[in-house]
Image: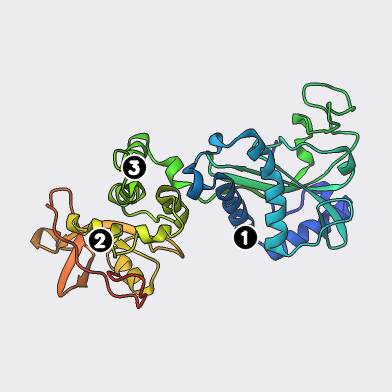
Amino acid sequence: MTLFDPYEPSPDVDHDPELTQVRQFWLKVDPEGERFGRVLRDTIDQLLDGEHTGRFDWNELHKTEKTHAGTLVEINLLREFGLKSGADMDYLIEGIEVDCKFSQALYGWMIPPEALDEICLVVWADDWKKKWSAGLLRANRARLTTSGTVTKKGNRDGKFQLTKKDRGLVHWLWHEKPLDENLLLHLDKDTQAAILAAGSGSKRSPGQAKVNELFRRVQKRRIGRTVVRTLAQQKDYMKRIRGDGGARDKLRDEGILICGDYPNHKKVAAALGLPLPLEGESVSVRVVKAKSHHEGRPRVLLDGDHWVEAMPEDGPERAPLLPRTGKAADSQD
């Protein structure tokens, strides 16, 4: 089946004025789906609850938690976009009742009898595939069926779903968009295992050891708050990065700089050719003082010397202090 361009309605959208109206609403409030995708990322992280559980894999969720995902997606979208609740369906959009259905299996949405012939906002996200989609579906009573049968009676709890031949009923708003990466989930197994094992034999600050190992092994990549929260498993998890006893301090003897999202840290990252940390993110890199064999490499002036990203053959040198951020909470900015 050829999917239509999400910015060009499929042929039968024009025959459904309500669906067209709802479609236009979504593409107006979120043309590229950036806000929608962020809600899905945040909802998955909310379910994983890494700060309290240490989990980062959807497969570790209990069945009841996975079932609850649809409710959380519905609620979080309502809040993000300021939607009104419908009288019978989840939302009232442009005066039109719309039901919200989420599934981690693409096309796996279960439609209840009360939503038949109504418009459904169908949503899919897969943390392993790093993709998400959202579209609109008129729950056609005559074409929906029970999985594995050719009847129209619905399954035991009265719900219906699409067959393969009727997947064209979905009019995509955004299809297979990138889902913000769950970093811990997608690290190679050796790196992941080393990070999780760090500090396992110590009763004192095992979370700090894991955060240190994260920034030691995962360099030149943006690392967000969620990863740190999952490894630190404490309320003030960002303390595990900061200079006052955090990773920025602990890794300094190894020559590792950890740039945060502060403007003057971003300048350092830019000078060294690193990815620029976004809000709540940090990027680490091992540095050494610039020498003749570093000619032409990006460099930054810190503590009166020029520093470059270390090459594999460069031995460790104590890293310089980063520029102060003005944040009293971070004594070694």
Instruction: Say which element carries label 3.
Output: helix
Instruction: Say which element carries label 1.
Output: helix
Q: Is residue 207 above or below residue 25?
A: above
Real-space CA distance between mark 2 and mark 3, rounded to the nearest whole angstrom: 18 Å
Q: Is residue 140 visible?
A: yes
Real-space CA distance between mark 1 and mark 3, rounded to the nearest whole angstrom: 31 Å
Of the residues under marks 1 and 3, which one precedes in the sequence?
1
Residue 190 in the image: x percent, y percent?
Answer: 33, 35
Is residue 313 or residue 43 the one in the foreground?
A: 43
Mark number displayed over residue 249: 2
Mark number displayed over residue 35: 1
Q: Is residue 333 left or right of residue 224?
A: left
Q: Is residue 173 left or right of residue 19?
A: left
Identity of the residue drawn at 82% across and 52% down = 98
* Tally of numbered discs: 3
Circle 3: is it few (<14), some (14-19), or many (20+) Cα within 10 Å?
Answer: many
Considering every residue shown, the one lying at the far top of the view is 149
